[in-house]
């Protein structure tokens, strides 16, 4: 059985960037539905005692486990998304320097995240990861895919599924990305 995480902020804490109403739906309905689906699928199976990460790795590219893989991936991705708010402060000065060394400036880094997020066609995620060589890298994934199965270590992500922004921004994904990225990277 996997857990439905608690938010460590109030549902109105991200306003006006993300409304209380969006959190109520995105966290309270969408995220919860992925958790419930995983728990329904793993009940009385070999997956029941596994960690979320192991469920994802062990269902990856298995035809009969696609639904489990997708839902488990979405739980993992959403757990990380909610934890990404305030990441700028959690990671501190060394991280800031590494970002500048890697991407040129904080502004270039923000732009890179927005540009990559805009390139996701349909539903997906934009991520900051540490790649196999130990370097920071901005990548995107589709649908419920996670960097876990590509051996890249995720640091934070931004949800670019429409349900993440439609109530607040309608079709304006770019505005959502700019606002959210500025907000979560406040250093
Ligand atoms: Mn979402």
Image: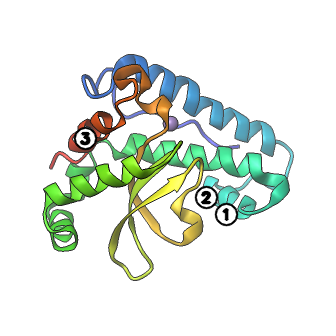
Do the numbered discs 1 and 2 sit on residues whose CB atoms are within 8 Å?
yes
Confirm if mark 3 falls within 8 A of ligand 1.
Answer: no
Q: Earlier in the sequence, mark 3 or mark 2?
A: 2
Q: Position of residue 126 (x, y in %)?
A: 41, 52
Q: Earlier in the sequence, mark 3 or mark 1?
A: 1
**Left or right placement of residue 133 versus residue 91 in this view:** right
Is residue 81 placed above or below 105 in the rendered structure? above
Q: Residue furthest top?
A: 21
Q: Position of residue 100 (x, y in %)?
A: 15, 67
Is residue 133 placed above or below 173 in the rendered structure? below
Of 90 and 133, nearer the camera is 133
Real-space CA distance between mark 3 and mark 1, rounded to the nearest whole angstrom: 32 Å
| Quadrant of the snapshot with the N terminus | top right
Confirm if mark 1 falls within 8 A of ligand 1.
Answer: no
Label 2 sits on a secondary structure element that is helix
Q: Which residue is mark 1?
A: 57
Label 1 sits on a secondary structure element that is helix
Task: Say the numbered circle drawn on residue 53.
Answer: 2
Q: Residue at x 41, y 16 (%)?
A: 21
Q: Residue at x 56, y 33 (%)?
A: 31
Q: Residue at x 36, y 18 (%)?
A: 20
Q: Position of residue 76 (x, y in %)?
A: 55, 49
Q: Which residue is mark 3?
A: 178
**Left or right placement of residue 24 versus residue 66 in this view:** left
Of 187 and 172, nearer the camera is 172
Sort mark 3 into few (<14), some (14-19) or many (20+) by Cα contacts within 10 Å.
some
Q: Position of residue 116 (x, y in %)?
A: 36, 55
Label 3 sits on a secondary structure element that is helix
Where residue 82 sits, quadrant-wise, is: top left
Real-space CA distance between mark 1 and mark 2, rounded to the nearest whole angstrom: 6 Å
């Amino acid at each position: 059985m996997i857990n439905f995480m608690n938010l460590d902020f109030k549902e109105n804490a991200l306003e006006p960037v993300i409304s209380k109403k969006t959190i109520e739906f995105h966290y309270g309905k969408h995220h919860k539905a992925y958790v419930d689906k995983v728990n329904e699928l793993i009940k009385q199976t070999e997956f029941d005692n596994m960690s979320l990460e192991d469920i994802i790795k062990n269902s990856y590219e298995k035809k009969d486990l696609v639904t489990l893989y997708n839902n488990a991936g979405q739980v993992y991705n959403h757990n990380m998304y909610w934890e990404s708010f305030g990441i700028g402060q959690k990671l501190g000065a060394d991280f800031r320097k590494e970002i500048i060394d890697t991407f040129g400036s904080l502004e270039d880094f923000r732009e890179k995240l927005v540009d990559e997020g805009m390139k996701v066609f349909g539903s997906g995620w934009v991520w900051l990861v540490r790649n196999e060589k130990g370097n920071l890298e901005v990548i995107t994934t589709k649908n419920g895919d996670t960097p876990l199965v590509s051996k890249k270590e995720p640091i934070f992500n931004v949800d670019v599924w429409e349900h993440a922004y439609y109530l607040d921004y309608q079709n304006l994904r770019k505005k959502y990305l700019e606002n959210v990225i500025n907000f979560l990277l406040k250093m």
